[in-house]
Image (spheres, rainbow, N blue to C red):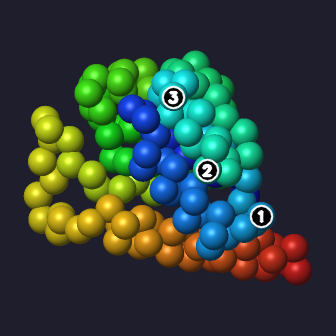
Amino acid sequence: MKLAVIDGLGGGLGCQIIDNLIKELGDSVEITALGINSGATFNMLKYGAHRGASGANAIRVNLKDMDIIVGPLGIVIPDSMMGEVTADIAATVAESSAKKFLLCINQPHVELVEVEKQPVAVLIKKLIGRIKEYIQMNKKSDDQATIE
């Protein structure tokens, strides 16, 4: 399964996600680090992403092949992450047919109502659990289709 982790700024959240994905899923996923900037990509690659690319065009091109997109909620909100997320990046992510797993990390100009504030480590643990469930569910569906 092909999975893209998208992050900006220094890629710190993406690094944590990649580290946990590798620990929990090993080689069952191919991880592509898509940094909104080169620093984020570089850092995510250091944490074990299989490949990486930077910028709006790289995100647009690579998302065509992805099964899963992972990142903070800001990747679908224009002008989030201190302005790094352009309208084009947000639209590209939102319009992708890939399944999206987004962490509810508040942005200064967006408030999520009725979302319980939790430490990032707890959110990442829940995120990885949902991704594992999704992969297992889709693997069973693929296995069923093969049998029939």
Residue 53 screen position, x and y as percent:
64, 29
- Disc 1 to disc 3: CB gap under 8 Å: no
Report the residue marked by disc 3: 39
Location of residue 73 with respect to 148 vertically, above or below: above
Residue found at x 39% / y 32%: 9
- The residue lying toward the viewer, choosing from 87 and 125, is 125
- Res 42 → quadrant: top right
Location of residue 79 with respect to 113 vertically, above or below: above
Q: Is residue 43 left or right of residue 87?
A: right
Closer to the camera: disc 1 or disc 3? 3
In the image, farthest residue toward the right: 147
User: Can the viewer see residue 98?
Assistant: no
Report the residue marked by disc 1: 27
Element class at badge 1? helix
- Disc 3 to disc 2: CB gap under 8 Å: no
Marks 3 and 2 sit apart, C-alpha to C-alpha, by 13 Å
Q: Which mark is residue 101?
A: none
Closer to the camera: disc 1 or disc 2? 2
| Mark 1 Cα shell of 10 Å, populated few (<14), some (14-19), many (≥20) | few
- Kind of residue indicated by mark 3: Gly
Name which of mark 1 and mark 2 comes first in the sequence: 1
Q: Which mark is residue 47?
A: 2
| Mark 2 Cα shell of 10 Å, populated few (<14), some (14-19), many (≥20) | some
Q: Is residue 141 left or right of residue 101?
A: right
Residue 48 screen position, x and y as percent:
67, 51
- Disc 1 to disc 2: CB gap under 8 Å: no
Residue 83 screen position, x and y as percent:
28, 23
- Kind of residue indicated by mark 2: Tyr
Q: Quadrant of the C terminus?
A: bottom right
Location of residue 114 with respect to 33 vertically, above or below: below
Name which of mark 1 and mark 3 comes first in the sequence: 1
- The residue lying toward the viewer, choosing from 14 and 130, is 14
